[in-house]
Image (cartoon, rainbow, N blue to C red):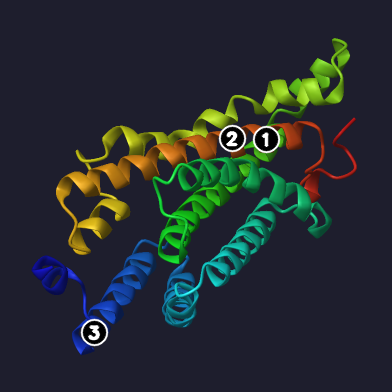
């Protein structure tokens, strides 16, 4: 417990100063490097502080009740789907399909870890694992979809060639977009391959700061990483089929895809 007391950052003036300096450092790097995202750094930082402050208050209450925790998970899921839908550039009417893709990855993983009892089915057990899994399946949906749409746009001739050879539209499109899945899943796979050697991810550090042993921290992190690997793979597989089947069509492709 002494480790948790000394290693956890305290919300005091020192933390505020460090946060301001970190944002200034990011903005300066963007300005000097002509990255063009100085304002994005500032707005992202302000949003992060405000949102986390509000969410911390809500979570404090939600953790006291399983039902409140489940309601908060539902809100997280909806926000994740809406965020991914916006990043994909598909119409708002396509939101149910994006929700399907995110749920396809998140739900099986959460059901398995919670129903097995590995993670307790209560507020403190449900909220952290659900947030991690939903957030990462959202990322998988966004990366997979954006790469798939870019591939169709850049290789539209290959799609048309597939049609000319007698393939129906979903089959021809899938031949084009299928190779993009590996690239979309690579960040998660690399994190899993290098855990403990390059980084000590959040779940591991969280357990240590909470007073757990290194073995308990390792078990928690392996559970999270393998859960994310499964969830992201499921989401990517479903989303690719939705793109190939033209259930999801980016705005700039509307009218010429599908053929």
In this view, the residue in front, 192 or 253, is: 192
208 with respect to 48 (left or right): left
Q: Position of residue 4 (x, y in %)?
A: 16, 68
Q: Position of residue 44 (x, y in %)?
A: 47, 72
Q: For marks 3 and 2, give the CA distance.
A: 42 Å
Q: For marks 1 and 2, give the CA distance.
A: 6 Å
149 with respect to 259 (left or right): left
* Residue, disc 3: 17
Q: Position of residue 51 (x, y in %)?
A: 48, 78
* Residue, disc 1: 238
In this view, the residue in front, 162 or 76, is: 76
- Which secondary structure lies at badge 2? helix
Residue at horizontal 46 percent and vertical 65 percent from the top:
123
Give the number of the disc on residue 234: 2
Residue at horizontal 29 percent and vertical 78 percent from the top:
19
**In the picture shown, does residue 20 fall above or below 228?**
below
| Sequence-wise first label, 3 or 2 | 3
Q: Quadrant of the N terminus?
A: bottom left
Q: Are marks 3 and 1 in contact (CB under 8 Å)?
A: no
């Amino acid at each position: 417990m002494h480790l948790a007391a000394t290693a956890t950052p305290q919300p005091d003036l020192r933390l505020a100063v460090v946060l301001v300096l970190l944002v200034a450092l990011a903005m300066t790097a963007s300005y000097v490097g002509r990255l063009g995202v100085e304002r994005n750094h500032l707005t992202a930082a302000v949003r992060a502080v405000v949102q986390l402050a509000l969410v911390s208050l809500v979570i404090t209450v939600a953790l006291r009740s399983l039902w409140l925790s489940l309601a908060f998970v539902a809100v997280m899921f909806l926000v994740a789907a809406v965020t991914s839908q916006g990043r994909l550039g598909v119409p708002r009417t396509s939101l149910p399909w994006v929700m399907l893709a995110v749920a396809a990855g998140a739900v099986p993983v959460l059901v398995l870890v919670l129903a097995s009892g590995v993670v307790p089915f209560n507020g403190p057990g449900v909220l952290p694992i659900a947030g991690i899994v939903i957030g990462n399946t959202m990322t998988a949906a966004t990366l997979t979809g954006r790469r798939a749409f870019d591939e169709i746009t850049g290789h539209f001739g290959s799609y048309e060639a597939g049609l000319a050879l007698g393939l129906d539209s979903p089959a021809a499109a899938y031949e084009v977009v299928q190779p993009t899945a590996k690239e979309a899943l690579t960040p998660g796979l690399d994190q899993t391959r290098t855990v403990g050697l390059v980084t000590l991810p959040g779940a591991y550090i969280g357990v240590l700061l909470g007073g757990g042993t290194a073995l308990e921290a390792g078990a928690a992190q392996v559970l999270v990483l393998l859960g994310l690997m499964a969830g992201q793979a499921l989401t990517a597989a479903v989303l690719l089929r939705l793109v190939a089947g033209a259930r999801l069509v980016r705005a700039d492709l509307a009218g010429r895809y599908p053929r």
